[in-house]
Image (spheres, grey):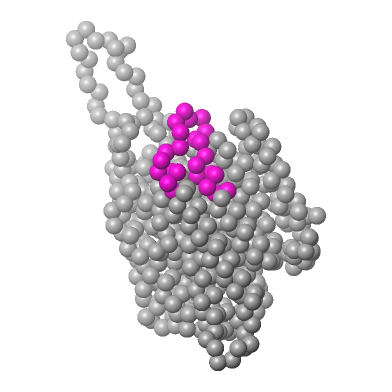
Amino acid sequence: MAYLLLIFFPVTMAASTFVLRRQTELVIFAALGTVLAQLLIATQIPVDDPTRFLGVTLTLSPLNRVFMLLFLTIGGFAMVGAWHLPHGENFIPIALLILSQVCAVLLLQDPFITTLLLAATGLTAVLAIVDLPAGASNLVGTQAIAAALKYLVLMSVAAVLMYIAFVLTDIYRPGELPGRISPARFILALLAVGFALRLALIPFHTWLTHLVDYAEPLVAALIITLLNTSSLLVLILVFQSYPTLLLESEGAHGVMRLGAVVSALTGGLLAVGPATLRRTLAYLILYDCGMVFYGLASVSSIGLAGAIFGALNQTLAVTLLFVSLGLLERPDGRPPGVTRRDLLRRWPVAGAGFLAGGLGLIGLPPLNGAMSQILIYQAAAQRGWIELLPLVLATLLAGLGLARVAAERLLGPSEVEGEEEPPLLGEIDLDRPAPRRLAPEPRSTAVLTLVLLLLCLGIGLYPQPLLATIDEAIRGLAFLRAL
């Protein structure tokens, strides 16, 4: 019963909040209550206690429970941010639907049904991208519609590739036809391309850059954190269910690692070049996705621990970055098109959150990404310096990209108003325009930013509890023992 509540209770509340979507405060309170109830249910479900429902196995592993609790927490943070940050008119119902689908992905153990659910999450995400802005009279921009269509097409292609791979895996019998070329490499290639599309690995990354450029910050945060990270967990489930794909495709591991290295290195290179604040953020995420995928492609216990830890850190850091971005983009009375260069002085909490989130993605101590990067470097060092050096170079380039955008947009001198001109002949104070008053950062969103920043710092200082949980989950993976 608890499994069904995790899946269907948010769907029911999504329908209710859709009906009441005009009453923003009531809808947000109802959504937060739903997330808290989901968190309570998830903590009460026994771990590794499978059950059958309509012929489908549902179970919750220790690792999946950690990520489920994290996803529900991130969903709650997004709903708190909806008080003051831009979002769509139907953002809350769509967010609840995404949470329901992600919970189902984490509970199900059937790759075929999971593939269909991943395709469904892509369709739900498209609804969030093209959602009408809340409280605005203008319609959705053409660029946002183009980004949504690109995301829909690429996610559909990824779902088709994964489904074909699972069908071939189901009919493939190792050793049945000796002397024939094994199709394991072809199946693994289909899976690698399908999941590379979902994880936005270069050269399958254009949907992510367009999403960051034209979608609302909260929408982009939900899609990148929940859907990308859940896709990574599904890929681990696939390797666990079909370890023969890795056993008979040893040479293909090097190609996957090479693709991950190229993705991380290219993301760092793009971040160094001139780009907008949003585009630089997208490049930093691309770099981190390449690093996480390298840890997974290394097919070692150290690399897999780094990939899982990195995925968890990426979820928190990306949420912090987009919440801070939403605050940094708030209007402050200046004419449209004026570029601010003192954003850290104008929005100190948001500026500090953006810097901390970027440093967390890069892996600078003592933030949360440091431990995952160290583990991934260790996995690369086991393969030799020829794989370690490009990853270190990618990290340095990503750091330079963050330093560039900080110098251009965050750490500039304070932009103060010019000196008041003396009154003209016959001019009185009432004839002068009213002085521009800069509003402070919204209190609830500033507190949310500080909470996320403290979480990132706390995990970076005390990573041992999470590492212990990850190590325990890794020891139970059959494909690592087989390799």
- As drawn, 349 above or below 313: above
Where residue 105 sits, quadrant-wise, is bottom right
In the rendered view, tell whether residue 24 sits above or below residue 475.
Answer: above
**Residue 382, image x, y percentages:** 46, 83
Q: Nearer the viewer, residue 194 or 482?
A: 194
Residue 464 is at least partly visible in this image: no
Left or right side of 438 for 318:
right
Q: Within the magenta stretch, is there residue 133?
A: yes
Q: Residue at x 55, y 63 (%)?
A: 160
* Residue 95 % position (x, y): 60, 45
View extreme (bottom): residue: 179
Residue at the (75%, 56%) spot, across then down: 3
Check the image and name the residue furthest to the top.
426
- Comparing 26 with 186, the one in front is 186
Is residue 450 left or right of 238 when viewed as pictured?
left
* Number of marks: 0
Q: Residue at x 43, y 62 (%)?
A: 204
**Quadrant location, the C terminus:** bottom right
The boundaries of the magenta stretch are 124-147
Camera sees residue 327: yes
